[in-house]
Amino acid sequence: MIKLLKYDWKRNSVTLIMAFVIIVLIQAVFTGAGKANGWDPNGVYAGMVVFYGMAAFLTFLLAFQTYHSNIKSYSRRLLPVPSVYLAVTPFLLLLACHAAVGILFIAHDMLFRSLFGWGRSLIDLMAEHVGAAQAAGIAATYVWNAAVTSAVVMFSITMSRTVEGKGGTWLGLLTAIILFTAVPWLEGVIFPVLSETHAQIGFITFFANAPGSTEFELVPFKPIHFGVVLFEAAVVAALVWGIAYLLDRKTKL
Amino acid sequence: MQPILKLAAVSKSYGRKAALQDVTLEAAPGRIVGLLGSNGSGKTTLMKIAAGLLRPDAGSAEICGVPAGRATKAATAFMPDHPLTEPWMRVRDAVAFFADFYADFDRSKAKEMLGFMQLNERDKVSTLSKGMNERLQLTLTLSRNARLYLLDEPIGGVDPVAREIILDAIVQYYNEDSCLVISTHLVADIERIFDKVVFIKNGRLILHEEVEEMRLKRGKGVTDTFKEVYAE
Amino acid sequence: MTIEFDNNMPIYLQIMNYVKKLIITGKLAPGDKIESVRELAAELQINPNTIQRTFQELEREGIVETRRGLGRYVTNEETTIMRIKKEMAGELLDRFVVGMRELGFREEDIVSLVSEAVKSKAPAGGEGEG
């Protein structure tokens, strides 16, 4: 599997490196300009966070596009590897990219604090309200949400490849829509108590802050509730099995 | 001796269209089999089933006694009508890719073949002409020591010079322990290479003969017999 | 070796005839080593199994022999070579006589026509008869 990941990276290496450089440049310019012109640090910070959020979102797109290309290429489909690996490696690449963005964010955050002498960055807030265990919990939630989203999208992409032409695309979209609505709804039904606090599955909640105001509101991350996690785990397992099944039997090349 | 490829009553449909109907055929080690038919006759579907990419709707496909599927991919070298390389690769990346994933890949054979095909390791795959690309695909495929080679239209759409080189390479690097199945609609150029030929028409197997027998008994080679059979 | 192949006739027979010709005309001398199956197959772009069959037939006729571990060699037996030469000539003659008879020629005419043709036609490239 590591070999597959290596080639997923090689396929995207130029794009990723360029993107990384661009992000660094833009963030540097933005922050530098903000400092030089005496902009309100809250605004600059908000912009910075939004931009990192966008970067994270774009890596999702890259990962899914890689998966889509993988299942369309003979070079991958003929390999004597379990079909499911073709879905796992783009996800691992995704996590690696997000880790890189995360590290960049933390570095930038620290730089920001020293530049602006401002005590309201995310890290500060977290240091105040959140202990180490909760931080780990947040990270785990983040990874888990990414996993669930990826499973749903990749399954939908796989479904779209079972039928030729436009019909396939519609099938994929339909599958995605159904899953994205049905699963949270099911969770609400099975676990009614938590439905208000639980952030919708799949969507990135890390940066779902409300910037643009002078106060930062951190959406409280739900504590890890094992029932929900188990349910989602079952869903993910079913989707992954579905991906393997479809790739082996039903998808066109 | 156990046949390398064995298809028994294989049928496959796409929706309502029957791509293959009740196809039975066997190929022994050391044989070069020609799979002939017009476009859309089912040749590619047959190869994909043998390659483990598709499951038959009915019947069975076995490679050395094992049902075709993931387990047989390691012993089957399929060269489809599409690239086996990714656009970002250089020739040496493609070779490394194959070496990484296929245990039966022979790097020294690949190096020799690349020289024979006049391909440079540093060439970018995206800048190769169609003929050069075809040579690369063939190099990658034949450098594996597989039990079954499936070549889908290796000489189609390729200039005569490249065609000569490709045919040369096929005969040169042929392995007596393996079986080679080649599909083509350009029969004349290649018929001297086949041990036996299989004609597919509308998904059905309509002819299955040793080529020399065909020449002896019918007084006609493959090309003329092909014209006769597909004339209607 | 370059041969024009007729795809409508068994290839192995065509190669056999070609090899026999090479031997009769001395291009392949008695005791000469013959290319391996693989080499020949690659050169002619022919299925190796066909070449194999050719060699088997040639061996059966005693024209070619396999020396263990060394390869295939043209026979040293002059008598065998003579025999093939006569066989091939015989085939040519049979066809010729049948053809001439179809045209309506009688025996004496055929013989005198042959005599004339031989005298007037210069031998090609030093290959004499006999």
Image (tube, grey):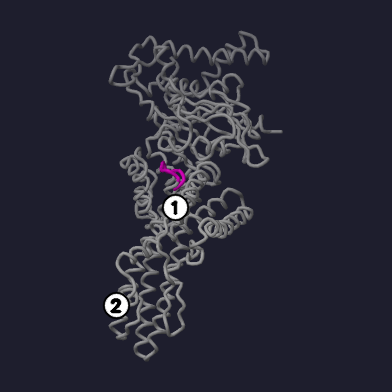
Query: What subunit carries mark 2?
Result: A
Check if residue B195 falls in the magenta segment.
no
Q: State the residue at coordinates (47%, 39%).
A: B78
Q: Earlier in the sequence, mark 2 or mark 1?
A: 2
User: From the viewer's perspective, is A121 left or right of C5?
Assistant: left
Q: Could you tell me which secondary element the residue under label 2 belongs to?
A: helix
Within the image, what quadrant is residue B10 found in?
A: top right
Amino acid type at image mark 1:
Leu
The mark found on residue A230 in the picture is: 1
Residue C46 vs C69, above or below: the answer is below
Question: In the rendering, at what x and y percent does residue C42 appear?
Answer: 41, 33
Q: State the residue at coordinates (62%, 13%).
A: C98
Q: Which residue is mark 2?
A: A110
> Which SS does the magenta portion mostly show?
loop
User: From the viewer's perspective, is A169 left or right of B83?
Assistant: right
Q: Specify start and end residues of the magenta stretch as a single range.
A: A76-83
The quarter of the rendered structure image containing the N terminus of chain C is top left
Q: Nearer the viewer, residue C10 or A210?
A: A210
Question: In the rendering, at what x and y percent does residue B178 appear?
Answer: 42, 30
